[in-house]
Image: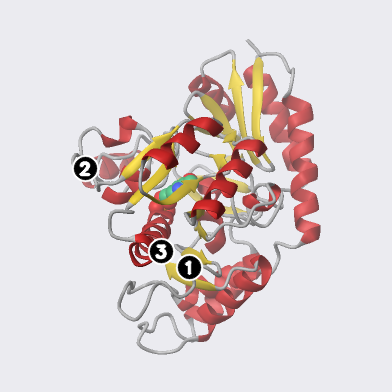
């Protein structure tokens, strides 16, 4: 461990503040450190390992594909990505999919698609994209611009032009912003993740969807974190009864391999043409074979389980000693604690439970299939750590 720590410090760029823990292996919702120490994982690599670590079905699909064809360029046809796109469309009603390798890239594609739609339909001055304050949409120069948090912007100016930030849950505010600007798209996370695990309210989301429909503005739902079953429906927007024009997703979709997807609806399916966009690795057969095994198992039964586990966590934590409030949806949960969140997180880690942070909150993103007895054990540790 000290070796790895020292080498990491020497050779890895200084962008990550790591916990003093080397994770070497895992199975399901259990992970192990270099000394064989066992932890219940309530973070899932930030909502990525949807069915836990080294899930058999996923690992089999991935290794079979790796031993058959690990890559072919997008100059040729390939079956795993087509099957995955078909499954995504059949399960959502969306019409076409562009595959990439990350959440930021999925959003880049969404932004390009929305801008091209608006340029062609309304004119080149309709380039503005409204996002929300406290949002998080990625780390590229354009998705940083989309991210409505100045802390991420400050050292990298100038960013891509044409992003406006509306107040969360302020219906009049966003109406006025649309009236006063030439707007191509509105992009929202139905549950803001990095911004503090806050679900948007239903009236606001409905209002945004209504404005978009009335004004022919592209509605983009960033489902990178809140999607893929995490919030109790296949995609979180389904909890709100809206139909977005574009859905971007990543994280949990690949189950642990890099995969981004931009889903386009009726309005946007024909916007991008040959050579408008591309990605060397996008739609990689190994990533897509793994994703097929994930997506095919996010069914009603699994989602019932997500909802039941969510209810259990909310019931246990709401009003518990040291807990100020519990927010979020499904298995995307934020806990405002009386203690400093970092202290709660460290205490959990010392007692064999891994949890995350989002702003000032403790954040939980357990595997969608975390066994109830492990969840029970982990929540007991967490409750104890919250006590002042
Ligand atoms: C993580 C995240 C992103 C960025 O995804 P990367 O794969 O890190 O590029 C974008 N949007 C949301 C909502 C996220 O949570």
Q: Residues within 10 Å of mark 1 (few under 14, many from 20)?
A: many
Residue 169 position, x and y percent, is: 56, 32
Specify whether 359 is left or right of 314. Answer: left
Q: Considering only vertical position in the picture, is 139 above or below 290?
A: above
Q: Which residue is mark 3?
A: 101
C-alpha distance separating marks 3 and 2: 27 Å
Q: Is the CB–ligand 1 distance for label 3 below 8 Å? A: yes
Specify whether 152 is left or right of 65. Answer: left
Residue occupying image coordinates x 50% and y 71%: 97
Residue occupying image coordinates x 35% and y 87%: 75
Q: Nearer the viewer, residue 109 or 209?
A: 209
Q: Nearer the viewer, mark 1 or mark 2?
A: 1
Using the rendered view, name the quadrant where residue 309 is placed.
top right
Residue 28 position, x and y percent, is: 65, 54
Q: Which residue is mark 2?
A: 10
Which disc is residue 268 wearing? 1
Chain-order first, disc 3 or disc 2: 2
Q: Is residue 25 visible?
A: no
Q: Nearer the viewer, residue 52 or 261?
A: 261
Residue 4 position, x and y percent, is: 33, 45
Chain-order first, disc 1 or disc 2: 2
Quadrant of the drawing holding the C terminus? top right
C-alpha distance separating marks 1 and 2: 46 Å
Q: Nearer the viewer, residue 122 or 157?
A: 122
């Amino acid at each position: 461990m000290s070796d790895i720590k020292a080498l990491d410090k020497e050779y890895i760029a200084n962008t990550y503040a790591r916990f003093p823990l080397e994770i070497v292996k895992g199975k399901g919702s259990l992970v192990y450190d270099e000394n064989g120490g066992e932890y219940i994982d309530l973070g899932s690599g930030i909502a990525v390992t949807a069915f836990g670590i080294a899930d058999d079905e996923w690992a089999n699909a991935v290794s079979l594909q790796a031993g058959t064809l690990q890559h072919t360029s997008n100059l040729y046809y390939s079956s795993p990505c087509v099957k995955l796109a078909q499954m995504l469309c059949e399960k959502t009603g969306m019409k076409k999919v562009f595959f990439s390798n990350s959440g930021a890239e999925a959003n880049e594609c969404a932004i390009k698609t929305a801008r091209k739609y608006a340029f062609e339909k309304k004119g080149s001055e309709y380039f503005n994209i409204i996002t929300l304050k406290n949002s998080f949409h990625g780390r590229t120069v354009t998705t940083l611009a989309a991210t409505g948090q100045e802390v991420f912007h400050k050292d990298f100016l100038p960013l891509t032009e044409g992003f406006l930030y509306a107040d969360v849950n302020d219906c009049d505010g966003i109406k006025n912003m649309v009236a006063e600007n030439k707007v191509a798209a509105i992009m929202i996370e139905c549950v803001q993740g990095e911004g503090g695990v806050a679900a948007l309210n239903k009236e606001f989301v409905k209002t945004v969807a209504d404005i978009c429909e009335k004004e022919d503005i592209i509605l983009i739902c960033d489902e990178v974190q809140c999607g893929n079953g995490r919030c109790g429906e296949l995609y979180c927007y389904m909890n709100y009864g809206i139909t977005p024009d574009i859905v971007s997703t990543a994280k949990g979709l690949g189950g642990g391999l890099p995969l981004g997807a931009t889903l386009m609806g009726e309005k946007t399916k024909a916007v991008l043409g040959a050579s408008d966009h591309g990605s060397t690795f996008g739609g990689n057969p190994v990533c897509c074979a793994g994703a097929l095994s994930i997506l095919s198992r996010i069914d009603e039964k699994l989602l019932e389980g997500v909802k039941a586990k969510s209810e259990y966590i909310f019931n246990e934590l709401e009003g518990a000693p040291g807990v100020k409030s519990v927010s979020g949806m499904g298995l995307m949960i934020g806990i405002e604690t009386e203690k400093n969140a970092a202290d709660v997180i460290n205490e959990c880690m010392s007692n064999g439970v891994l949890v995350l942070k989002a702003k000032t909150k403790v954040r939980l993103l357990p595997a969608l299939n975390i066994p109830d007895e492990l969840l029970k054990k982990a929540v007991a540790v967490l409750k104890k750590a919250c006590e002042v």
